[in-house]
Amino acid sequence: MLQDLALVVELQALDRKIASLEKEVAALPVHVAQIEKKLESHKRHLEASRAALTANAADRKKLEGEIQIHEQKISKLKSQMLEAKTNEQYRAFQNEINWCEKEIRKQEDRILEFMEQSEPLDKNIKLAEASLKVEQKQVDGEKQSAQKRTAADQSALAEIRTQRAGIVAKVDPKLYTRYESIRKKNKGVAIADATDGRCDGCMIALRPQFFQDLKSGQEVMFCELCGRILTYNPVVSFDNDIAPTLK
């Protein structure tokens, strides 16, 4: 294999490593953002449940206050009944007392409803708090792991880029320029194998003479259709490796 061809093959391998590492470095913050978003959603749900429980308690307290007001009014009405001069006045006081007692019963029923609603709310909040604590720990662990992985990837990238620069310095400038042009055009892949007489980049069958020239390895050759740099790696044959016959 020509030296320049060997160099661009090595260059392609390094570029693939660089692309893979860059993809991972870019993906890690996205992953962290996704798990943080999920955690934030759970936090908002918990806060909504807490707010609902607080509102429930406030409503009950308000009803208890109204009951107290009605009870005080009943007590006052009963005192006034003792001073009633006529049956009509007495019945008026009694009707008002009955109305207050009816309102108290309504408010007591509402308080019971709020109490029934508060029990599952309280239970769900405690479960959510416990679950959120575990999830927060997991998220913190994943964030720390992502940070370490990113640091390792960045270090590996710096090392590979240094290796790449060393190879680029050895490659013929014209070939390197063409390699970069092909790579950008073909989603990062500038080299294709043609061992089977076909470019594995675009799958075109090579002309017989073109294929023979490629096999000779006298010059760097490019696919006539897609333009990729072609390599030829002869298949190892074991046909002649006949084991000795035992006598």
Image: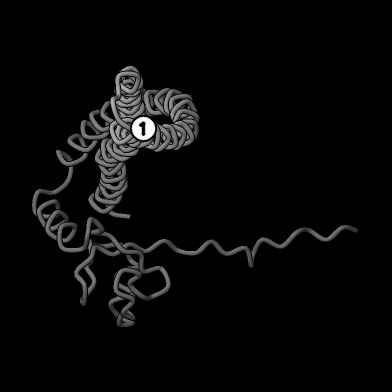
Residue at image x 33%, y 30%? 90
For the point 83% across and 61% down, which residue is it? 245
Q: Residue 12: where, in percent of width, then height? A: 27, 50
Image coordinates of residue 38 in percent, x first then y, are 34, 39
Q: Secondary structure at mark 1?
A: helix
Quadrant where the C terminus sits is bottom right
Residue 126 vertical position relative to residue 9 in the rendered view, above or below:
above
> As rendered, which of 213 and 47 lies closer to the eye?
47
Say which of 102 and 183 sits in front: 102
**The residue under label 1 is which amino acid type?**
Gln
Q: Nearer the viewer, residue 154 or 200?
A: 154
Residue 51 picture location, percent across and down:
30, 30
Q: Name which quarter of the figure residue 215 lies in.
A: bottom left
Q: Is residue 143 visible?
A: no
- When asked about the image quadrant of residue 221, the answer is bottom left
- The answer to whether residue 96 is visible is yes
Callout 1: 10 Å neighbours few (<14), some, many (20+)? some
Residue 83 image offset from top left, x and y in percent: 30, 19
- For image coordinates 38% across by 75% down, the residue present is 197
